[in-house]
Image (spheres, helix red, strand yellow):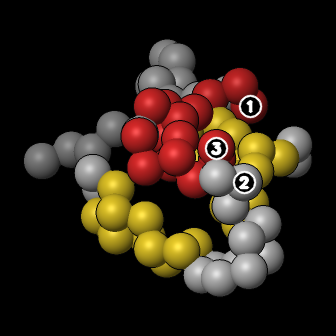
Amino acid sequence: MRLSLRKPPEDTWEISRDQYIWLENIGDEHLMLRLASGDFRFDKGRKYRFRRDILDDPKVHALLDARKLAIREN
């Protein structure tokens, strides 16, 4: 069996800055997000990067409305 060491003609995976957002826990307590991909502990005062489609999650939207999360620029 021979393995090819040539690079593919084009990259198939690129990161675009507009596909991601930063969410910051501005509340005074840790949050536990139950996302479709699994549980996520969101520590207070921390900022994490997520795909933009997390804003479609009603739980995240409720936390944004309650001012426990904030959208931040990088």
Residue placed furthest toward the right: 73
Residue placed furthest toward the left: 1
The tag on residue 65 is 3
Give the residue at x 65% y 82%: 29
User: Badge 1, how many Cα within 10 Å: few under 14, some, many 20+?
Assistant: few
23 horizontally vs 3: left or right: right
Q: What element carries label 1?
A: helix
- Compare marks 2 and 1 and give the one earlier in the sequence: 1
Residue placed furthest toward the top: 9
Contact, CB < 8 Å: mark 2 with mark 3?
A: yes
Give the residue at x 58% y 53%: 63
Q: Quickly name the residue at label 2.
A: 67
Type of amino acid at the residue the image marks with label 1:
Arg
Residue 62, image x, y percentages: 52, 46
Type of amino acid at the residue the image marks with label 2:
Arg
Residue 68, image x, y percentages: 68, 61
Q: What element carries label 2?
A: loop
Which sits in the foreground, 31 or 66? 66
Q: Distance between the residues labelled 3 and 1?
A: 24 Å
Which of the two discs, 2 and 1, sits closer to the camera?
Answer: 2
22 horizontally vs 15: left or right: right
Q: Quickly name the residue at label 1.
A: 17
Q: Is mark 3 on a helix, strand or loop?
A: helix
Depicted 55 relative to depicted 48: above or below: above
Residue 16, image x, y percentages: 68, 27
Which sits in the foreground, 37 or 31? 31
User: Badge 3, how many Cα within 10 Å: few under 14, some, many 20+?
Assistant: few
Q: Distance between the residues labelled 2 and 1?
A: 24 Å
- Compare marks 3 and 1 and give the one earlier in the sequence: 1
Give the residue at x 74% y 31%: 17
